[in-house]
Image (tube, rainbow, N blue to C red):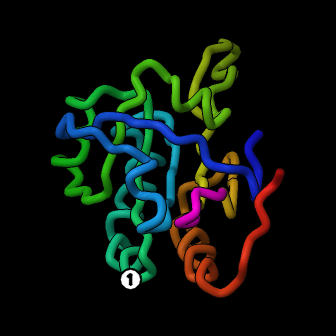
Amino acid sequence: MLQSGDIAPVFSLPDADMEIFDLASALGKQHVVLYFYPRDKTPGCTLQAADFSDHEDDFARHDCIVVGVSPDDCLTHAEFRDQEGLSVRLLSDSDTDVCKLYQVWREKEVDGVKKMGVRRSTFVIDKDGVIRHALYDVAPRGHVAAVFELVKELGKKPCKMKS
């Protein structure tokens, strides 16, 4: 699993408007909160996306952007965004390549059936591309407030990269 101090793997994915988001282009300019979630339009995912959207300006005041990633396609993301009034950028990882890159694609058991799915996870990445916080199996309720506290600390302390 990726940990604090690791270099964040760079990637490019399309968003709900089919425009490409390239992590490398954000680095050097902004911190990034990268959160992975299982599916659009589910209660926990809706709560989390709405909460991040409601606090997007707070994150922006700390030079931070928030992007969400799930295996849903761009059209599903657009419908989800429009139905829920979301403002955070939702990225489509329909091939699950980025989920695998961040090691959040795993086997789950639901009602006795094993299947692959996204492990709800959040990575706080600093402007230098270093993962400052790697949070796995997060609960949607209260998560955004906790992540915001971590982002506020980014400007206050240096982080050593792992070699």
Q: Residue furthest right?
A: 163
Mark 1 nearby-residue class (10 Å; few <14, some 14–19, many ≥20): few
Q: Is residue 123 above or below residue 159?
A: above
Residue 160 belongs to magenta span? no
The residue tagged 1 is: 61
Q: Is residue 24 left or right of residue 84?
A: right
Span of residues in magenta: 126-130
Q: In the picture, residue 21 is in which quadrant?
A: top left
Q: Where 135 falls versus 80 (above or below)? A: below
Residue 25, image x and y in percent? 38, 52
- In-front residue for pair 70/123: 123
- Quarter of the picture containing the N terminus is top right
Residue name at image x 25 percent, y 56 percent: 86
Q: Secondary structure at mark 1?
A: loop
Where is residue 139 drawn, in percent x and y? 61, 54
144 left or right, relative to 163 = left
- Residue, x 20% and y 57% (percent of image)? 85
Please say whether residue 127 is one of the residues in the magenta stretch.
yes
Q: Amino acid at mark 1?
A: Arg
Rendered position, 99 above or below 43: above
Q: Residue at x 38, y 83 (%)?
A: 61
